[in-house]
Structures are given as C-alpha cells and as structure tokens.
Amino acid sequence: PALKLSYNHLPYHLQQLFSYCAMFPKGYRFEKEQLIRMWIALGFVMDERKKLEDAGSDNFDDLVDRSFFQKDEQHFIVHDLMHDVAQEVSVHECLLVDGSDSLKVFTSIRHVGIWTESV
C-alpha cells in the first residue's frame, strides 16, 4: 500500500510513463534513451517549450529521483515491488505475456508485450 501511495502522488504524466514499464518483465534493464524514444513514439511525452527528448529525459530523471527506477551500472531497473505496482495500475491497459501465466485479457488492453527466453 505504501508504494502504491507513492505512485498515486505522482503527477498524471509521470504515472502514465511509469505504468508503461509494466510491459517489461521484472528485472528488465532499461536504457534511458530507448525508453524515452518509446514514450515519445506513443505520445506520452508532450511539452511545447522543450524538445521532446529533453522533456522525456527530465521526466525520466524525476522518476529516478523519486526511486521509481534504480541505477544499475549503465542501465536502470524497476524494483520488483515497484514493478508489481506498475502491473497493478496498468492491468486494464497493458498486458505482459511471459509464457507461464494464465491470461485474463481485458477488452481495454492497448499495449501487449510478449517475452520469451529464446526465439
């Protein structure tokens, strides 16, 4: 509940950016620039005063400062418990299929991530 409270106190645009991380498996090592490009492509980053890349970087840094991401060498990860929060708050919009879960698919799902150990 305390972690969800931290999420609930985020501004809406940061909630949207963070909840998108539910599309990735626990322990996924994010590259900052790659994630920002995804956010921009999805229309999640908007700022009329700055370049979108700069606005996305500021948003990402804000999430790091609030401990939603943790630095891991040259990458960033979402702590397992925070990942659970991301999945909980995005259950009606994002679906992660990892091959071992039984699926409950809501009609409101807009994003699907499929992860396998080997291709």
Image (cartoon, rainbow, N blue to C red):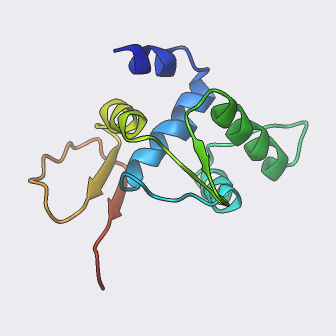
Instruction: Note whether 6 is above or below 47 in the view shown.
Output: above
Pinpoint residue 21: horizontal percent, then vertical percent: 47, 47
Rendered location of residue 79, percent (x, y): 45, 40
Q: What is the x, y in percent for residue 106? A: 20, 42
Q: Residue furthest left?
A: 102
Q: Residue at x 57, y 40 (%)?
A: 69
Quadrant hosting residue 73: bottom right
Relative horizontal placement of residue 51, taking residue 80 as reference (left or right): right
Residue 102 image offset from top left, x and y in percent: 8, 53
- Give the farthest residue toward the front: 73
Residue most toward the right? Answer: 49
Quarter of the figure that contains the C terminus: bottom left
The answer to which image quadrant residue 84 occupies is: top left
Please tell me which residue is depicted at 44% across the width and 14% down the height of the picture.
5
The quarter of the picture where the N terminus appears is top left
**Drawn side of residue 81 relative to residue 8, left or right:** left
